[in-house]
Amino acid sequence: MIRFMLAIIRRDLLLVARQPAEMINPLVFFVLVIALFPLGISPEASLLSQTAAGVIWVAAMLATLLSLELLFKLDHDDGSLEQLLLAPYPCWSLVLAKVFVHWLVSGLPLILISPLIATMLFLPSHAVPALMLSLLIGTPTLSLLGAIGAALVTGVRGGGMLLTLLILPLYVPVIIFGASSVAAAAQGMPIDGYMALLAAMFVFALMITPWAAGSALKL
Amino acid sequence: MTQSIWRMPRWFHQMGSPKWFYDFGGILQPWFAVAALVLLTWGAVWGLAFAPADYQQGNSFRIMYVHVPAAILSQSIFLGMAVAGAIGLVWKMKVAFMVARSCIAIGATFTALALLTGAIWGKPTWGAYWVWDARLTSTLVLFFLYAGVMALNQAISERQTAGKATAILAIVGTINIPIIKYSVEWWNTLHQSSSFTLTEKPSMPADMYLPLLLTVLGSYCLFALVVLIRTRAQILQTQSGASWLVQHRDITGA
């Protein structure tokens, strides 16, 4: 089964490598959204640094949502999803492999570019490690939860909007704790509690979502 | 082999039969209607007009008799919807999916009612229509979950698949219910903690919480009534060609 998962990971990475736009677009979207906030609200450093934590987290969530729709859609459209589901391996392993690639392609670049973003929004530099850690724990959770939504709307017309509607209520706790942890770090307060809760949410999502998304795919 | 702890009693499988559910539901329906009418009227009149005024809040607390039943029902209905969906998925019962589908609209209505009456109550009591504390935010999330379930149900055209997809979504969304319920204990919230629980004596005097009990029970009866009507309507819609329905006295008028 590990070889099955590795094969899927390799295949999906190959597909992304052939179309680098899939990887670049969410990243550019992330940076653009971040750039819009100072333009739309106020370029004042004091105001931006207070809201930076939340803005970065909301932008990360939106960027993840953007790339989620394609998670299963491309495979569904050309029929390979059906064949993969027929394979003698549990459905959740397929989901887990695909979510891992999705995170590598959309979540990891966000984490790597976040120090630059933090500078743009005047987030204090001592909060940047907390930002990166919260994104490191949080973005896989977002990918996992998003997989459920993507699986449910596979093959449904107008699925993109519906996906957003379905997933956002589930994202709310992750965003709340992610943004609060960075805001707390910016004020110099300890972040252990927030990180522990984020990690708990990640583990919970890891346990439940592959199974739930697998059942949804089989519908 | 056949004797296992998971063998369900006969009535469980009987409820899964559309004909049986339709007929039994038809017998129960008027009783729930009467019960809902009596309990809700009695509770509402007693609570809104005759219960003693609160020493702190005066008469504005009376909206509790609308707000609390709506809030309790909004959470119970989501749980009920998830349970019905789970039964449908495990035992592959069409009727269970129909019941789950019937719960969506009424649950969303109760949630909206709870949020609105809460805002109206909040203004004189806290000075604000809305605060982003844990309980209000998680109840708002519950409303969005209902909206998501409703949207997913309408988006999938094939009925059976729609039932299964909404069941999965409802089960996943159930994680929000303990968050709402225990939010007042886990976080420092503005919202007060529970006025009564199942196990302890309530802290309110009897002539304040009895009307509340009546309105809560009445709301449950109203919910049961609505679910019965809607599920029986779905049975009529989907089983319209079935032989038992064609000869049924509701159709032939005999």
Image (spheres, coloured by chain):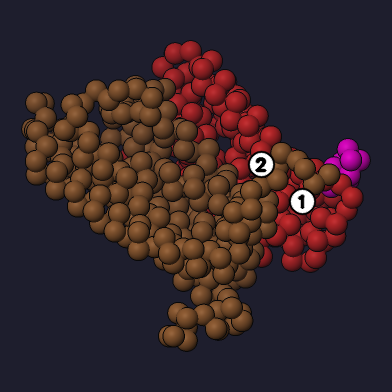
Chain colours: A red, B brown
Give me the chain letter of mark 2: A
Residue type beneath disc 1? Val
Q: Is residue B229 above or below residue B67?
A: below
Categorize mark 2 by other alpha carbons within 10 Å: few (<14), some (14-19), many (20+): many
The residue under the point 11% across, 30% down is: B54
Direction from residue A115 to residue B89 in the image, left or right: right
- Asked whether A4 falls inside the magenta stretch, the response is yes
Identify the secondary structure beneath mark 2. helix
Q: Position of residue B170 (x, y in %)?
A: 54, 49
In the rendered image, which residue does mark 2 sit on?
A: A209
Give me the chain letter of mark 1: A
In the rendered image, which residue does mark 1 sit on?
A: A16
The residue under the point 16% across, 33% down is: B207
Query: Visible in this render: residue A120?
Result: no
Upstream in the sequence, badge 1 or badge 2?
A: 1
Task: Write the start and end of the magenta stretch as one range.
Answer: A1-9
- Asked whether B67 falls inside the magenta stretch, the response is no
Q: How far is disc 1 from disc 2 in space, using C-alphas?
A: 23 Å
Q: Quadrant of residue A21?
A: bottom right
Callout 1–callout 2 Cβ contact below 8 Å: no
Name the residue nearer the viewer: B218 or A213. B218
Q: Position of residue B135 (x, y in %)?
A: 36, 34
